[in-house]
Amino acid sequence: MDYARCFIPRLGEHLYIHCPDSAGLRRTTIYAAAEYNILGRLMQYLPMHAPLNPRRVVYLFIYMGAAVESLTAAGATLMASATIGTSKNLSGGVLISVALVLQGVVECLFLSMVALLHHCCVRSHMLAPNVRMLCIMLYGTSSLVLLRCTFRAVQAFSMYTNSCGQYYCGTAINDEWYLYVFEAAPMALYTYWLNTIHPGRYLPVEHDRYLDPDGKTERMGPGWIDARSKAITFIDLFDMKSAFRGRPESTKFWLHLEQWPAYPETHVGPSAKPRGEEERS
């Protein structure tokens, strides 16, 4: 996608060159989806601090992402069917600009959820080395996605608020170094980060394996307990009824340590190795 966008400053009069740019938001959503999956797995590992069903975290952000994608599709459709500089084309550009801003808002909500989980772990003395590494990873990668969203929003608004006849204009679109520094570089670093320090090395393979409240021992539990029907868990992701009445004690399986055995030969401590190294050794 970025390769096509590199030609925009030189070939601005060709509408078809802008089609990849209009649909480029989808790739940001794909990158962000990887983060959503990691956060869901981290909540399964720390069920006592999860604000919602960990298995529904991805769906929560998919719902919000669907709204963003709808605006992007509508904007791209208007732009593709209109001449540059017309009111219809401008309306499409505004929709895409708003979608980029909303994508940044979704990323900020994601960062807030990571910060909440991190704060709960620190307060309860459960910030194990692998949990700390995953929090740092999510902070870093999400900040890179947010940086790209911010740049693209600024670029979009500068493009569609400057009238240059049949051409797009604006500093952010005419100077190619903005593209390399604020879009290509963050995504390249994001990809390198997740492939070099893979999150799977710091999360257990078993989804029912969780961290004991002592912050050191791992146990095999029943997994997230939710007595509601599957359809209701998709509709009411945050279980608002339990939020007001309090969760039943029967669902707080981490309070009954005698029922869930410690995972064999597993002890999370300051010298714990990444999961990949443990398996190789």
Image (cartoon, grey):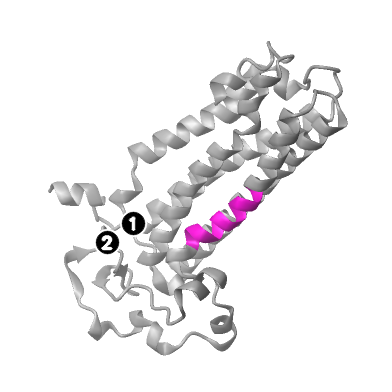
**Secondary structure of the magenta portion, mostly?**
helix
Identify the residue at image location x=75%, y=41%.
95
Where does residue 122 sit, x and y in percent of width and height?
Answer: 45, 66
User: Residue drawn 40% across and 60% down?
Assistant: 42
- Residue 62 got which mark? none
Residue 66 % position (x, y): 60, 51
Q: Nearer the viewer, residue 211 or 222?
A: 222
Q: Type of residue at label 2?
A: Gly
Circle 1/circle 2 CB separation < 8 Å? yes
**Residue 125 visible, this angle:** no
Left or right of 274 on screen, residue 180: right
Please provide the residue range marked out in magenta.
57-68
Q: Mark 1 points at which residue?
A: 129
Q: How far apart are marks 1 and 2 (CA)?
A: 7 Å
Q: Horizontal and vertical percent for residue 97?
A: 73, 39
Image quadrant containing the N terminus: top right
Q: Relative to the observer, which residue lies in front, 18 or 281?
A: 18
